[in-house]
Amino acid sequence: MHPWEGFTLDGLWRYTLGSPVRKLAWILAVILGLVVGLGGIAWWEGWVFATWGVRHAELAAQLRDRGTVGIAGRTILSMRSVETPLAPVARYPALTSALAGTEVPRVAEAVRASRLDGLLVRTDESLGMPRSALRALADMHPVDGMTAVCLDDAAALYEPAETVEISLDDARRLITVVRLVLSGATAPPERLFPESIRRTRPVEVALIVRDGHEPIIWRSTRAGSIARALLDVTFAVLDRWSTRQQERYGRLREALGTKSLTVAVFYDKGVLGSRTPGFLRRAADPRVYSVGYERLASWEYALPPTPWQPAPDPVTALTALARDRGVAPPGYLRPEITLYRFRALQIMEDAPNGPIELYDPR
């Protein structure tokens, strides 16, 4: 007799429901199938997140309360629940053309003209042709005209940004002002600074005092203009010159005769949403970027690269910063810490009271 002879669906149904145990098992199997199916649909649509999945929390926070954001590449699955409208760049011919070109400032102009509230670019795909603007954004390279406000291993959110520019003549004047104030002179009023220096914009300025190439003291402050931040950070270094520095180098006024100064304007500052070593090293090239973190309103950072030395490896720098500031293990991986990368336009004295160099690696 053939094994399947006499087999019918009706017989299978009677066998399945023929006992309470088999009936219960059948019902449980149906319920489990429905839960798995509906859960999968909810995860795909972004209504729920899998506990093992990447939530891209930093990106989601940066996208919140924005208008329409253009997206280059596939939509991230866990971004489907974000209320901000994500519009494929293919809907905007001018933006598509600019991304295919090589000039990122044209991308910024197209984003503004399209009335987009940002541009989301996949970073886990090779988008665009080599040397195109789109490829540079997807590779998280330093660019002009756009700044990455948030980056992770799936995507980066860009906004149009004003390029920080300081003429060599203005750079010399700024160093002169710093030297005079550090020596005890009265700080000049902001209205005497050039318009580009006193123009209102949020900015952070650092002042570094060096013995040769070695930094011996540095501070940074944030203010509403480069002029205001420059004056504030100069006073901060005056206050910081402690007994320890004085014992080694003498009074600051006399020490300035043998010490060179650097004024650094920080810009292109973006949140690093992923913390894996591979991502950090890819997103924060130490030849161009430095890194830092915010924790409980405290801002700690590694000094930016110089002509003679790149910035520290980002993983090494963040590990050292957390250790030196007494952050408990796992250090910079702690959830209350927010990581950043940033660039700096630096006004550097080659020697005490010597020639001035503008340094901003690209």
Image: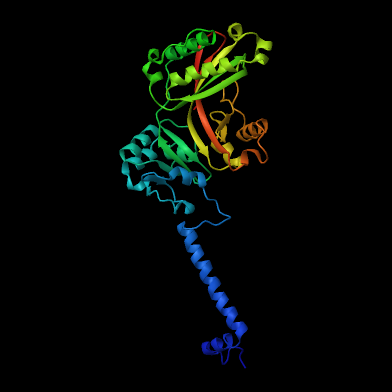
Say which quarter of the image contains residue 190: top left
Identify the coloring: rainbow
The answer to whether any part of residue 127 appears in the image is no
Say which quarter of the image contains residue 278: top right
Q: Relative to 66, say whether 210 is above or below.
A: above
Q: Relative to 310, say whether 19 is above or below.
A: below
Question: How far across and down, in percent of the image, does residue 123 sit?
Answer: 49, 43
Question: How far across and down, in percent of the image, does residue 131 sit?
Answer: 45, 36
Question: How far across and down, in percent of the image, does residue 352 sit?
Answer: 57, 9
Number of on-image labels = 0
Residue nearest the observer in this picture, 285 or 330: 330
Q: Quadrant of the N terminus?
A: bottom right
Q: Relative to 120, say whether 259 is above or below.
A: above
User: Which residue: 31% across, 38% down?
Assistant: 113
Q: Relative to 151, say whether 182 is above or below.
A: above
Question: How far across and down, in percent of the image, does residue 320 sit?
Answer: 66, 32
The answer to whether any part of residue 189 appears in the image is yes
Say which quarter of the image contains residue 97: top left
Residue nearest the observer in this picture, 155 or 199: 199
